[in-house]
Amino acid sequence: MKTITEHLAGYAAYHRDRRNIMTHLVGIPLIVIAIEILLSRPTWFVAEFMLSPAIIVSAIAALFYLKLDLVLGILMTLLLGLAVWLGSHVAMFETAVWLSWGIGLFVVGWIFQFIGHYFEGRKPAFVDDIMGLAIGPLFVVAEVVFMLGGKKKLHQAIEAKFK
């Protein structure tokens, strides 16, 4: 399994332009929330616990992120939990409203992504490596942590790959 540095550096290779990174700070969260909304139906109960595809996918993603890095994994788990909570609430609306929010946020999120890649002059990372779809949300969270001065060694290790 690749290390967090390898995953983030591979993704960062497609995201060197600051404008692209900034569009991703908006677009990726919108896409994640949209996916959580859309996966929040159907629901079923297992031993008094409500489950949905959103919960299952988020739990698997959280375990992946936790295995890569404990601190960023905990942060990702909390953010995914918040997105599941939001998605489950939107899923309670009538079908037209639920679908409008889910599809609408998904489309707007991808518009931001493609504007960013226009600035970058390069295709999205997932085109070459499907794992880019899973690493994108982690990349966004890591970028915010780096902007706030955290995880300096990780940030330096990633940036060293581009010097």
Image (tube, grey):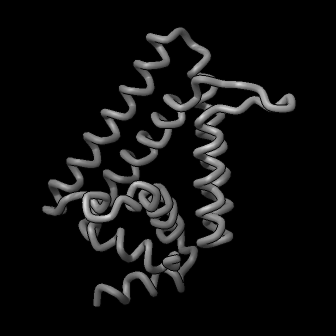
Q: Residue at the spot x=36%, y=68% of the render?
A: 11
Q: Residue at the spot x=66%, y=25% of the render?
A: 43
Q: Residue at the spot x=40%, y=48% of the render?
A: 28
Q: Quadrant of the C terminus?
A: bottom left
Report the side of 71 relative to 25 (left or right): right
Residue 15 image-quadrant placement: bottom left
Report the side of 48 relative to 98 (left or right): right
Report the residue that reaches farthest toward the right.
Answer: 47
Residue 41 image-quadrant placement: top right
* 109 versus 156 height, above or below: above
Residue 99 image-quadrant placement: top left
Q: Nearer the viewer, residue 18 or 90?
A: 90
Report the side of 94 relative to 60 (left or right): left
- Expressed as whole percent of the image width and height from the top left, the position of residue 115 reads 20, 48
Q: Residue at the spot x=32%, y=64% of the render?
A: 129
Report the side of 14 relative to 149 (left or right): left
* 26 versus 154 height, above or below: above
Q: Nearer the viewer, residue 39 or 19?
A: 39
- Expressed as whole percent of the image width and height from the top left, the position of residue 48 reads 86, 28
Q: Give the number of marks.
A: 0
- Expressed as whole percent of the image width and height from the top left, the position of residue 94 reads 53, 9
- Expressed as whole percent of the image width and height from the top left, the position of residue 106 reads 37, 34
* 143 versus 115 height, above or below: below
* 13 versus 34 height, above or below: below
